[in-house]
């Protein structure tokens, strides 16, 4: 069990370092990232958002198990040991906050990349404002959003 706790602590340190690098990458222009030891990309933001979302989902389910009346009625020697330790409302709120931060940083990163790599025309500016709203979503989440064509087909079939 001690090994598991040590491994978890190391994973937390690595995750914290990675979050800090993602935060810094979202604040700098794409050219400034060329010398970075870690290759920051939109996909890395997506992986982290999806991983944190899954962790939140699993911890929420785990917490619900402890609230189950059946669990409370079990004799102490029959109860499973508490793992992961320290799941509480603060832990879940912290995960939600991290996910919101990652989405915000992703949007900033994508926006700065797009403005760096494309010309600034009126057409781009109009497209840019709608893209900024979606840039906080992962690529997987963006695929789930109905395109304009799908929305138009839905409204046409309703008439």
Image (tube, helix red, strand yellow):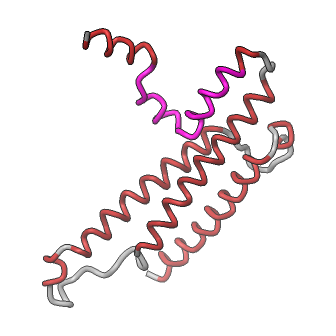
Residue 10 position by quadrant? bottom right
Foreground residue among 5 and 66 = 66
Foreground residue among 146 and 140 = 146
Instruction: Report the magenta stretch's main SS.
Output: helix
Question: Is residue 126 magenta-colored?
Answer: yes
Question: Is residue 35 magenta-colored?
Answer: no
Give the magenta range. 125-147
Foreground residue among 76 and 31 = 31
Which quadrant is home to the N terminus?
bottom left
Which residue is at 41% across, 24% downward? Answer: 146
Q: Is residue 21 above or below residue 128?
A: below
Foreground residue among 24 and 83 = 24
Q: Is residue 30 above or below residue 123?
A: below
**Is 77 on the left or on the right of 55, as rendered?**
left
Residue 62 position by quadrant? bottom left
**Is 96 on the left or on the right of 62, as rendered?**
right
Image position, residue 52 (x, y; %) = 49, 55
Which residue is at 54% across, 45% downward? Answer: 47
Which residue is at 37% across, 75% downward? Answer: 83
**Residue pushed farthest front?**
159
Image position, residue 147 (x, y; %) = 45, 20
């Amino acid at each position: 069990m001690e090994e598991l706790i040590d491994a978890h602590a190391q994973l937390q340190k690595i995750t914290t370092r990675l979050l800090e690098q993602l935060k810094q990458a979202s604040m700098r222009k794409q050219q400034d990232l060329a010398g970075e030891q870690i290759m920051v990309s939109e996909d890395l933001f997506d992986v982290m958002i999806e991983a944190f979302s899954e962790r939140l989902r699993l911890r929420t389910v785990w917490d619900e198990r402890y609230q189950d009346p059946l669990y409370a009625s079990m004799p102490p020697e029959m109860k499973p040991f508490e793992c992961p330790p320290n799941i509480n409302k603060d832990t879940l709120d912290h995960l939600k906050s991290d996910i919101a931060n990652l989405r915000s940083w992703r949007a900033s990163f994508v926006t700065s990349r797009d403005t760096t790599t494309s010309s600034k025309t009126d057409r781009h500016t109009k497209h840019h404002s709608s893209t900024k709203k979606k840039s906080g979503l992962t690529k997987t989440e963006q695929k789930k959003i109905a395109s304009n064509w799908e929305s138009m087909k839905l409204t046409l079939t309703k008439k």
